[in-house]
Structures are given as structure tokens and as C-alpha cells.
Image (cartoon, rainbow, N blue to C red):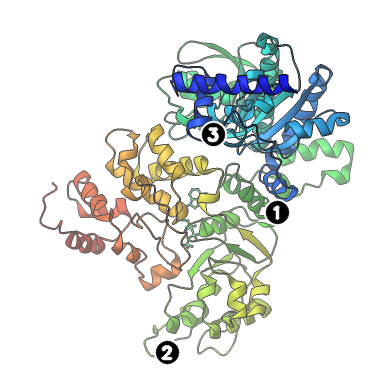
Amino acid sequence: MKAQTRSLQQHADRVIQHVMSAGADPSSSVVHQSWARCVNDYGLDPGRPRPARIVTSDVLRVHQDAADELLNVARAGVTQLYQEVAGLGYVVLLSDAQGVTVAFQGDSSRYAQLHQAGLYLGADWREAHAGTCAVGTCLHEQRALTCHHHDHFDGSHIHLTCTAAPIFDPFGQLMAVLDISALGAPSDRRSQNFALHLTQLYARLIENAYFWRRYQHHIIVQAGESRELVQVAGQYLWALDSEGRILAANTSARALCQRMGGVAVAGGYIEENTANEGSLARLLDCSWSEMLRLMGHSPLDIRALSTVDGQLLFARMIMPPSPRSQAEVLAKVSPEAAEPDPVREAPLPLLDSLAGDDPAMRRTLTLARRLCRRPVNLLILGETGTGKELLARRIHQSGAVPEAPFVAVNCAAIPETLIESELFGYEAGAFTGARSKGAVGLIQQADGGTLFLDEIGDMPLSLQTRLLRFLAEGEVTPLGARRPHYVKCRVIAATHCDLESAIREGRFRADLYYRLNGAELLLPPLRQRSDKAYVIQSALHQVCEMRGRTSLHLRADAMSVLLAYEWPGNIRQLIHALAFAEAMVEGDEVTASDLPEACRLGGHAAPAKVSSAAGVLGVPHLLDGPPILADRRLGADRSSCSERLPDEGELLKQTMARCGGNISQVARQLQISRPTVYRRLKKYGLGHLHFA
Ligand SMILES: Nc1ncnc2c1ncn2[C@@H]1O[C@H](COP(=O)(O)OP(=O)(O)OP(=O)(O)O)[C@@H](O)[C@H]1O
């Protein structure tokens, strides 16, 4: 016992001595830098060993739910790795990006001992709690490492040997850490070299399995350095859209991109030649049509291609499975199995591309995919700017009749006095001010298609009753008309309001709520999405298209700012911020200083709760898609909320300068009317400046 205490004390003294003399010297080893963090940043004391922290089962479930999509593929990898190393006394842990062990395999006869050592399901291995350790330090360093015996900071871990490797998502964000640990091992750390290789190998295996699953409905190009092995071990993976643009890449492929032509993969995400303008053709020195010709017919067609810097690669292309060819195969086995479920089987890229790996979004999109061709009304819930209207449009476009009308109505933007005539239409002379020929209502215009009722929570009670009648009976009687019209359309309603409290407070009819709510689709706020990097790249792509840019990419510092910001105005605000940066940037590389001040200062504003037809916060509201129909008809100015916003004047000035003072061009670029350009020039005192 005494000897053990003495050994712990010696370890603690050694750690402290080292931290005192070398501090956080960046040239020191990974382990020593971690020791310095433990003392200086986390206030840990090596002389006071801490018991392992195992989170409660409720907390564990939350972590496991969040990692659900990864766990579905990773569990098999954990089990297989365990089978390889169990005989050598190792256990296997998979921890999430917060350091909590979400999957575990170990010798059940030693569970008590393993539990005490923290080698257990639910163990929290963050550096800030556990000190220097393989999982925690790997999370910090984002690279594979071994933490052997006295490398550990905490004296209670010095008998362990642990090796961990990071698992990244297809955008380079760290998702999880795979670890193998043993309670005892030879003192020579070289005994762990093999463990390091094996853990890295399995981390890549899990990462790639996740990639394949995530992009199973996309074109995938797989490449490797050996023709014989490419099918089983082609280490480079790219997911592509139908134009050959890179949507995502695995770790090896991202590293290859980085090496080539100055393509930066800062922070792990794909930039420049890839996600934006970027096509695989620019990396592989072969046109997209040529690639399709050579490899597009069968995954067995393996072709030798050269990278633009001359490296020889063998590649094959895997097309997304087509429901028809699957049906043909199935028909040979069992005729009834050949009946395809058109919704579940068909790839629906319009829906799928709305999200990366965020579990909440994937759940929403799975539901949307199942329901898009079924005649059910849908209710979309989410804060302002989270993409409710876009999701509604994509559901419509993925439906059975995409060419049918999609009619969008913003219930909050239409004055109460006009909403009835706008929705239901009116006969000639139905009321004072009515057009002489009457007008077809918006509901009738949606016949055969989709009626999108945005901000349904703001619909006046009297109108709710009429809407309910339409939903129940399919009848629309225009004002002043004697006979009803029969209209068949799907209704998708959306709101940021809590409709259940509105019902309790008598502001919303419960029966209407149930009629509208065939299924509920939840859109998480951007700040909670784990696929922020994906959304940022999609938004950047959108801005490039709107502005006619062929290449624009984000430098690492800009990406860090965008990832760290809270986005109270959600994706709409993000798009405005990127549009602002596009106007500010010199050249093709957006840096942090090109972004609006609100983002750079790292504002952590409260989430937007209020109803607002325009976006809120920080950046002007200039770039929405086509204004919704009801707004257009009523001439509503959706950008009116932006009057308060600080960066609008600067953006206007920049755009004026870029367009040489051509007002029509400025109006087009900012997607506002010419009178609004003049109004804003006056407002910001820019009217007197000459931009030509
Ligand atoms: N997944 C996405 N990827 C890229 N852009 C998106 C995505 N979702 C939404 N957007 C863009 O964000 C902006 C806001 O989206 P949208 O108008 O659909 O939000 P909303 O929730 O309906 O907003 P509001 O509640 O204010 O009506 C649009 O420009 C839209 O194109």
C-alpha cells in the first residue's frame, strides 16, 4: 500500500515538475502539452486521483440517441475489433465527440474492475475531467495516439495503456473516438505500436462504412493505389452530385484534395475546387463526361486515372441504386417483391441534400421522404429561417406531381381584411374595391398541387373556421359566389409558434390543428445542428449561384467564425452573412474579416422567437428566394425588418461600387426593387456619392 502511495506521489511530482519547467511549450510532446493543459486550464491536481466518472443511464441515452446514425454502423466495427484484441486483454470503447463512451465491449467477468477503471459504457473521458488520456487527448489533438502508463495525468490511470483514433464525418468534423485499452501491459511503449495501427485501421473502417451509408443515394467514386485492391480497400471516397461536383469526401480523399492545387481543407471541410465550383474532374485530370463514359456503366469498370499532380490512381464509380433495376432483380426471385415502393426506394436528392449528418434533420427527412407522395397534410415546425418553406417546396417537388402548382401564402403578411378574399377569391363586384372580373383565390390556384400556409399560427380565428370547412369538405366558395368550387390539394402548414399553447389560450382551433397535423416535421435551429459545416457549404453554394460566382471559398478562420456563431436568424441569417461576405471579399477567399461584425464578435443572441416575415438580426434580409405569392400580390416589403440592421448600408455601398452605380443591377443583385434601392441610398446618406 505504502509503495503504491509512494509511486503515485512520484508520478504527481514528475508531472508537476515538468509542467513547471516546460509549461505548454508547443514543441514539447503531445502528452506534455496535455499535462500543461490539465494543470493550467482545467485546474487538475495529479496528486489527487479522481474516481472514474460514469454518466447516468438517462444522460447516456441522450448521448447514444445523438450518435444513433453512427452507432448503427460502428457497433459492428467495435465488436469485430474486440474479437481481434480480447485475447490480449484489451477492451474497446467508442466515445462521442463529448468524450462519453457510447459503445463498449469488454470481458464481462471483469466488469467490476473495468467499471472502477472507467473502462465502461457511459464513462466520461474528457481531458478536463479525466486528465491526459487516450480518448480525451485524441479529442483535443484530433489525431491517433497512445497514452501509455505514466503518460496519464491522473495517478489512478497509470496502470492503463490506451490507444485512440479519431473518426471524422464526411466534412472533416470529429464525430467520435475509437479506443482500445488494457488494464496492464508491458512497460515498453513500443509494445503498443501494433495497437495504434489496428485502432487507426478500424477507425477508418467505421468512418468509411458511415460514409457509404450516408451517401448510398449518391454517386460515389472510390479510388486507390492498387487496381487489385480498389474494390475492397480503395482508400479514397468521394460522393458526387449528378454534375460531378464533390458533396463530401472521406479523410484520405480530403487529404488528397488538400495536397492538390492549393485546395485547402482547413478544419477538415472541403473548399475551393471541391464543394463549391468544384468537381472531381479538376482533381483527377479527366472530364466529368469522360469519367461517366469510362466508369459510369458498372462498378466493375476500374480505370487508371492520374491526379493533376501526376499520381496514378485506380478508380471505380458506383451509381445510386435504381428502383427499377432492383425491381427487375427482385422479380426473378419473387414476383410480389418486385412491386417497388416508389417513395422509399427512389433516391430523393432534393430532400436528402437539405441536411448532412444531423440526427434530428435526418429523422425529419426520413419522415418527409415517406410522406411526400402520400395525401397527408403536414405541419412544419421551426424557428424563423430554419428552412420551413424550402422543405415544403422540396416535399412538393419530390411528390407524385412536381409540375402541379405550389402556392405559398404568408398568413402573417396579408392584412386581416384581405385574407379571406385572397384565400377564397371573389366574384365580380363582391365588395368595394374588388376587381371588375373577380379573382381566383389562392386555394383554388393550388388545385391539384400544394397549398403552403406559412405562419399559420397568425391566421385570424374567423378564417380558421372557413379554412377548416375547406379542409373537411374540399369546397371553396368565393366571396359573392352562389356555388362552391371543389378543390383537391395537399396542405402544408408551417409555424414558429407553439400551437398547443395557442390552443390552450383559445387563439387557435384545436380541430384545425388536428386537420393540419397529418404528421409533424421538426426543423432544428441551426445552432443545434451537428451538420453546420454542411449547411454552411450549401449556403455558400447558393450565394455563389445567386451572384454568378464560379469560385468562392472560406478560409479556415472564416469557417471557424461561422461554426462558432449562434445564428439566431438561422439559415436565412447565414445566407445573408455569406452574401455580405461575397460583397466584401477581394478575390475568391472569404476571411473572417469579410464577415458581418455581428458574427465576428461571436454574438450569442437569444434565439429568434418572434414572428417576423423578414429575417432578424445582424444582417439584412435581401436574399430570399422568390417572394411568396401572397406577398407579391400585396406588394408587401419583406425586407422592412432590416431597417434596424447595421451592415446593410455597407453592403449597399459595396454593391453600388461593384455595379458602377447601376441601380437596376444593384436591385437585381440584392433582390430588392429599384425604389427600395433609392430609399436605402437616401437612408444611409449614400445618394450623393458617385459610384460610376
Ligand atoms: N438546408 C438548407 N440549405 C441551404 N439553404 C437553406 C436550407 N434551408 C433553408 N435555406 C435557405 O434559408 C433561407 C430561409 O429559408 P425559408 O424561407 O425556407 O425559412 P423559413 O423557416 O420558412 O423562414 P420563416 O419562418 O421566416 O418564413 C432561404 O433562403 C432558403 O433557401
Q: Residues within 10 Å of mark 1 (few under 14, many from 20)?
A: some
Residue at 42% from the left image edge and 89% from the top image edge: 429
Distance in Å between CA atoms under marks 3 and 2: 59 Å
User: Dot 1 corresponds to which residue?
Assistant: 370
Residue at 35% from the left image edge and 70% from the top image edge: 635
Q: Position of residue 391 (x, y in %)?
A: 56, 56
Instruction: Give whichever of 456, 630 is nearer the camera.
Output: 456
When asked about the image quadrant of residue 633, the answer is bottom left
Can residue 554 be seen at all in this image of the molecule?
A: no
Q: Quadrant of the N terminus?
A: top right
Task: State yes or no: discs 1 and 3 in contact (Cβ < 8 Å).
Answer: no
Label 2 residue SS:
loop
Q: Amino acid at mark 1?
A: Arg
Distance in Å between CA atoms under marks 2 and 1: 45 Å
- Residue 171 bears which disc, if any? 3
Q: Amino acid at mark 3?
A: Phe
Task: State yes or no: discs 2 and 1 in contact (Cβ < 8 Å).
Answer: no
Q: Position of residue 154 (x, y in %)?
A: 63, 28
Q: Position of residue 86 (x, y in %)?
A: 82, 21
Nearest-to-viewer mark from 2 and 1:
1
Q: Earlier in the sequence, mark 1 or mark 3?
A: 3
Q: Amino acid at mark 2?
A: Gly
User: Dot 2 corresponds to which residue?
Assistant: 429
Asked if residue 681 lies left or right of residue 233, the reply is left
Label 1 residue SS:
helix
**Residue lying farthest front?**
2
